[in-house]
Amino acid sequence: MTDESRTDVKINGDGSLSGGTYGAVTVNGAGTINGDIDCVRYTINGASTSNGRVVAQEITVNGQGTFNGEVQATSMTVNGDASIRDGVGISKFTIKGHATVGGSIAAHEVVVRGFLKGAGDCQAESFSGEGAFTVAGLLSADIIDVKIYGTCSAREIGGEKITVRSPQGFQSITQIFTFWAEKRLTVDTIEGDDVFLESVTAKTVRGRNVTIGTDCKVDVVEYSDNYSRVDGAMVGEARRVEAAGA
Amino acid sequence: MDDELISKRELLLAAGISYGQLYRWKRKGLIPEEWFVRKSTFTGQETFFPRDKVLARIDKIKSMKDEDASLDEIAEAVSPNLGEISMTIGEIREQELVSAEALEIFTSEVCDCEAPLVFGEVVSLSALDSLLKTGDVSLEEGRAVLRSLKDNYPAFEGRPADLIFMRRMGLSTSLLVSSSAEVRFEPSARVVARLNLAECAEALSARIRK
């Protein structure tokens, strides 16, 4: 990547830009990008729509970003609202506002501190945060560690260490806004080596060490090493299965 | 020809691996998506795998890991970028990689140039060779299969495809199906061979490296 040939572009007010290779693209106001762009930084302070594929090292959405195409980035931070039509490949994907992804999500790290909605699978090395998410397909990561502050769902969750917590009691002033929302994760199947769950409704939970915490409703638990359940958690059936050798 | 299936739990047990490893390898593309077969059972949805393939793959991954290969290196080795297979007719003839008959049909039907073969051509040649080696496929039938591959394989655009060669009451025909497709035949039909085309090409390219 030769940065010398890349020019910086700024849209102040209302403007449009055609596809191409750029340095920093900054939209302060309302922007439209027609075509595929490849840029170093894409910053939206206001509203911007890109009609095409976006490849960037760093994307920051401080207002509203609409991406009618795929997104590939080293890092993407959504502080406002982002709506992406197709799939994304983002090394570090941070959502502090609201993000909707129409395709699958492939990332190293996903941090949700707002709301994430994915229409496909979500695959990462780590998936963490405090917020809410819905993933229509498989949510898979080595480490999944989430505290849920809303209605969450996924078809399947799989990984090494899966921790789902629900906030207990009154923790911070921000909770006033989410206090009445139902805080629950609903999922068909959870499979992991170490699984700790709170406020989860699941048909099947499989794992080596499984802990079913408060407010859970699980039809079947299959565990190989350890299993515990707090009083009040509903488990239809828990059965021990033979452990793998490793 | 149906591969025997193994459930995910049995697989973890048989291979001695954890859920974390299985999901990680899936994400890295070490275990192909089409091997994850979701089926409804009385306990709900369960995932199954083609037993022999997945166990062989996991063995390979584990042995490469023992040699300290990174997951990305393993991914490359187990699903080599097939576009990079490069061999010429001359090399194939010299090293006697395929039978003389297969090569003759191939050169007369497809091409006889010195340029490296493209991936589709390697697939066609290796599939033809495998079919002829079964001894159940005549040279003339091989020629017909080759034409069908030439015309139809590009439509799969690199997605995994199988070649099925079958015979019924003295007539023979071949068809191309996607690898995950389940195909059933009437009882009087006899399937002579079902070949995974990408595996054929991999096998041939493995021989040329030695």
Image (cartoon, rainbow, N blue to C red):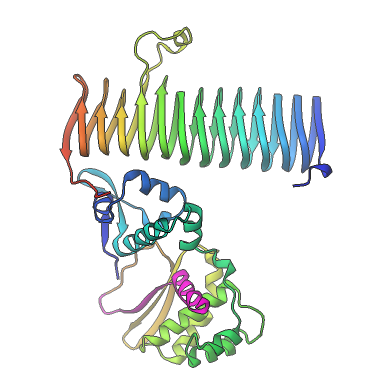
Q: Image check: B3 left or right of A99?
A: left
Q: Image check: A208 left or right of A153?
A: left
Q: Residue at x 54, y 77 (%)?
A: B122
Give residue B85's quadrant in the image.
bottom right
The count of marks equals 0
Q: Residue at x 73, y 42 (%)?
A: A37
| x and y percentages locating residue A74 in the rendered image | 62, 39
Residue interval drawn in magenta: B187-210
Position of B71 relative to A94 (above/below): below
Q: Image check: A21 left or right of A68?
A: right
Is residue A35 part of the magenta span, yes or no? no
| x and y percentages locating residue A1 in the rendered image | 74, 47
Q: Residue at x 45, y 91 (%)?
A: B139
Residues A182 and A157: in front is A157
Judged from this view, the residue extending furthest toward the front is B67
Residues A189 and B140: in front is A189
Residues A23 and B179: in front is A23
Is residue B197 part of the magenta span, yes or no? yes
State which quarter of the image contains the N terminus of chain B: bottom left
Q: Residue at x 40, y 74 (%)?
A: B195
| x and y percentages locating residue B91 in the rendered image | 58, 85
| x and y percentages locating residue A186 in the rendered image | 34, 29
Give residue A45's quadrant in the image.
top right
Give residue A101's quadrant in the image.
top right
